[in-house]
Image (cartoon, rainbow, N blue to C red):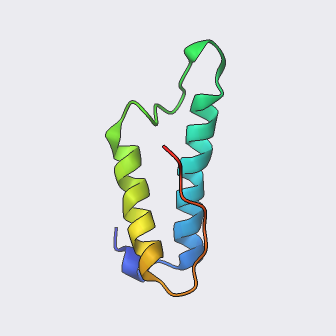
Amino acid sequence: MNLKKMSTAGILKMYGGIREALEVDDNSPNGGKPYGVREFSDWREWAEMFESELDSRVDVKYEKIRW
């Protein structure tokens, strides 16, 4: 995936999807984790990749995921 060619809005949407999946996992009753965000390191690696690209762009404001 070439993030340099992706729109800022597209990256923010994908990053937001990671945030939403993490919230669902963290708030699931009885320990159910439908997405396994904390169990699989790929989720965090993707988030860090998106953060790095967003940080390199001018005037992009977003709230980083608090792991």
**Rendered location of residue 7, percent (x, y):** 52, 79
Residue at 53%, 25% in the rendered image? 33
Residue at 39%, 74% in the rendered image? 3
Residue at 46%, 37% in the rendered image? 37
Most extreme residue toward the front, as rendered? 66
Task: Give the left or right position of residue 22, taking residue 47 as reference.
Answer: right
Task: Give the left or right position of residue 11, taking residue 49 as reference.
Answer: right
The correct choice, above or below, for 11 with respect to 42 in the image is: below
**Rendered location of residue 47, percent (x, y):** 43, 55
The image quarter containing residue 52 is bottom left
* The N terminus sits in image quarter: bottom left
Most extreme residue toward the top, as rendered? 30
**Number of callouts in the render?**
0
**Rendered location of residue 51, percent (x, y):** 44, 65
The correct choice, above or below, for 64 with respect to 31 in the image is: below
**Rendered location of residue 55, percent (x, y):** 45, 75
Residue at 57%, 67% in the rendered image? 12
The correct choice, above or below, for 50 with respect to 41 in the image is: below
Q: Nearer the viewer, residue 6 or 60?
A: 60
The image quarter containing residue 25 is top right
Task: Give the left or right position of residue 23, taking residue 37 as reference.
Answer: right
